Image (spheres, grey):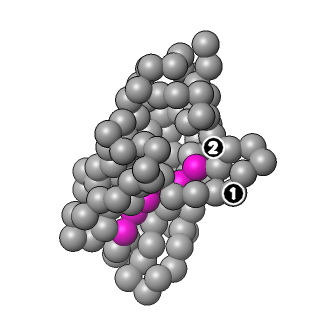
Amino acid sequence: QVQLAESGGGVVQPGGSLRLSCVVSGMTYPFRDMAWYRQAPGKERGLVAIVTNDGGKRYMDSVKGRFTISREDKNTVSLQMNGLKPEDTALYYCNGITMYGVDYWGQGTQVTVSS
């Protein structure tokens, strides 16, 4: 059974930092791409950052320069978040896409930015 386990969420003050991690288990081959999405209350889930199998990285405009996605190995992806703002508050999901285009999702980890 494929599982994506996120960790690292929490409550932080504006300007603070958090590092999210996602560990994959149960896959017989590595994901082609891995990404982080987020969903705030009342809003749709949206892409935050993605790292492709060739090492390319893309970010949503509002997090460029503040967030960094890294793929440490075939089963681990992280999201370093600096300069956090209240509008970054959301449930953050880890996502993996197979070479066949099939999506897998984690359960999500909550990030709350509040003073």
Q: Residue at x 52, y 28 (%)?
A: 85
- Return the residue at label 2: 91
Q: In the orientation shown, which residue stands out farthest toward the bottom?
A: 100
Element type at mark 2: strand
- Name the residue located 34 percent from the left edge and 74 percent from the top edge: 32
Could you tell me if residue 94 is visible in this image? no
Residue 83: x and y in percent read 41, 26
Report which quarter residue 50 is drawn in.
bottom left
Magenta-drawn stretch, dominant element (helix, strand or loop): strand
Q: Which residues are magenta?
A: 33-38
Q: Which residue is mark 1?
A: 44
**Does 87 sit above or below residue 60?**
above
9 sits to left or right of 63 = right
**What residue lies at 42% left-to-right and 77% top-to-bottom?**
98
Q: Earlier in the sequence, mark 2 or mark 1?
A: 1
Whole-percent x and y of residue 27? 42, 70
Toward which corner of the image does residue 19 lie, by quadrant?
Answer: top left
Give the residue at the far top of this rendering. 115
**Residue lying furthest left in this view?**
54
Position of 27 with respect to 107 (left or right) is left
Q: Crowdedness of circle 1 by 10 Å Cα count: few (<14), some, many (20+)? A: few
Q: Give above or below for 113 relative to 55.
A: above
> Is 56 placed left or right of 94 in the picture?
left
Image location (x, y in percent) of residue 90: 63, 40
Rendered view: 31 above or below 58: below
Where residue 31 sits, quadrant-wise, is: bottom left
Does 40 lie within the magenta span? no
The numbered dot on residue 20 is none
The amino acid pointed to by label 1 is Glu
Secondary structure beneath label 1:
loop
Residue sitting farthest toward the right: 42
